[in-house]
Amino acid sequence: MSLSIGIDYGRRSWKLCLLDEAQPPEYHCFASPAELLAGLTRLCALFPEPVITLAAGNGLPLERLDRLVSEQVDALTTGYDEPVFSPSAPTVSAAGDALPQTQEGAPLALTGFVETLRSLNLHSYVLPSLAHLPTVPAYRLLLERLPGSPAAVCRAVTLLYRLRQREASWPEMRFLALEARSTSWQIVVVEDGYLTNGVHGTSRDLALPLPPATAPTEGTFEQAYWEGLLRDLAGLLAIHHLDEVVISGRRSETLATRLSEVYQLYYFPYAPHEPHGFEAALGAALIAAGLQHPRSLAAEVVQHLQLWRSVPVF
């Protein structure tokens, strides 16, 4: 059996999707990276050498984990790694190895996860963010608000895969993909099926200090959120001369109520009985399937997005 596994490694959530050609997709959510590693260890024991793709941290150009050097691991985890504090004994991973330690003695969660995963399975890959795609012009890499997480690319992979299932052609795919989260938003620009631009936005945290004359309230936060989102949305639509927006996320219903009379909005095309919130994990699994099955529809999406860099799977 050929198994494809996609991992969406977030800051506070850890999700996994399993794809097997003979079965419907399976979705799993874990409470911690340690639980995720334990689950992966069990899967690798049951299904030898699955193809695993990891959407985590800042991303890197598509590459096998066992080929990463320490500088690449640092680039992947910078700004995303967090110490995992244990009561006394050194933390041990699901594979039995002690996790890398900080100077203070606490193991680093993401660094330890990467190190353990690449020793657990040889066919594990790190996934790119928008900044690593050749379809994003170089000058846009200077923009500070380009979405930095590979999860944004993986969500787009799921969306484009669904559109190809409906026999939409690549030149027809010209729109913005907007994910409206509770406190932030991400917009990815799709032109002729290529990912060419994007924006990550957030309102200022109410816990952060504001000028003395400004009293932070829930109302001011909401005003800032919607004005910031609308400013980014209108700007990208104008710059790229696009009309359509595909929406998803926790605030998608509110977004549709507010903006449906102004913009052409379409809901993310979920499959029947598919849980929301796993778009990135599914996209990562589709990339794994594309690497494993070069004549599949998933491989067509991977190749069109130019994620493939002649990386041998076996």
Image: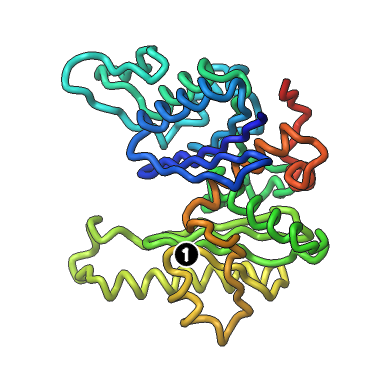
Task: Give the x, y percent position of residue 22.
Answer: 66, 41
Drawn side of residue 85 relative to residue 55, left or right: left
Drawn side of residue 72 relative to residue 107, left or right: right
Would you place residue 132 above or below residue 172 in this image?
A: above
Q: Name the image quarter holding residue 210.
A: bottom left
Would you place residue 9 above or below residue 102 in this image?
A: below
Q: Residues within 10 Å of mark 1 (few under 14, many from 20)?
A: many
Frontmost residue, 119 versus 174 = 119
Frontmost residue, 127 versus 40 = 40
> Circle 1 sits on which residue?
180
Residue at x 76%, y 35% (from the top left corner) = 293
For label 1, the SS is strand
Task: Give the x, y percent position of residue 275.
Answer: 48, 56
Q: Quadrant of the N terminus?
A: top right
Please name the amino acid that badge 1 sits on: Ala
Drawn side of residue 57 relative to residue 50, left or right: left
Residue at x 44%, y 74% (from the top left corner) = 227
Q: Name the image quarter holding residue 294.
A: top right
Frontmost residue, 229 versus 304 = 304
Display coloring:
rainbow
Q: Quadrant of the C terminus?
A: top right
